[in-house]
Image (cartoon, rainbow, N blue to C red):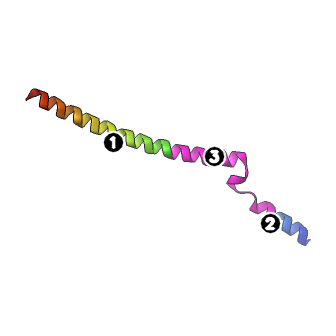
Amino acid sequence: MRTLIALILISLAACNPESSPEGRSKIRDLNLDAKIDSLKQHDKILLGRIDSLAKQIELLKKK
């Protein structure tokens, strides 16, 4: 009986997301999604700055 309980506890402890290929791929996908979202935000900021610089250049050309 103790052996059965020990086996059940060990098998439950081994069932975390990192223990299966599917779980690891889900974790990897979540990390990649977070990085992609971060890059998209960074791109928006950079594009805004580029637009601002382009407008400033146009104003300087008109002077």
The CA span between labels 3 and 1 is 29 Å
Q: Residue at x 44, y 45 (%)?
A: 38
Residue 12 colored magenta?
yes
Give the number of the disc on residue 9.
2
Type of amino acid under label 3: Lys
Q: Earlier in the sequence, mark 2 or mark 3?
A: 2
Indicate the position of residue 25 as horizontal and vertical percent values: 65, 44
Start-end of magenta stretch: 9-34
What residue does disc 1 label?
45
Quick check: is 2 in the magenta stretch? no
Q: Is residue 19 above or below residue 33?
A: below
Residue tagged 3:
26
Assess whether mark 3 and mark 2 are in contact (beta carbons under 8 angstroms).
Answer: no
User: Which residue occupies the extreme left position in the image?
Assistant: 63
Nearer-N-terminus badge (3/1): 3
**Residue reaching furthest to the right:** 1
Left or right: residue 3 versus residue 14 is right
Query: Of the numbered discs in the image, which one, if any, rests on residue 55?
Result: none
Query: Hey, which quadrant is residue 47 in on the image?
Result: top left
Q: Quadrant of the N terminus?
A: bottom right
- The disc, 2 or 1, on the residue closer to the chain's N-terminal end is 2
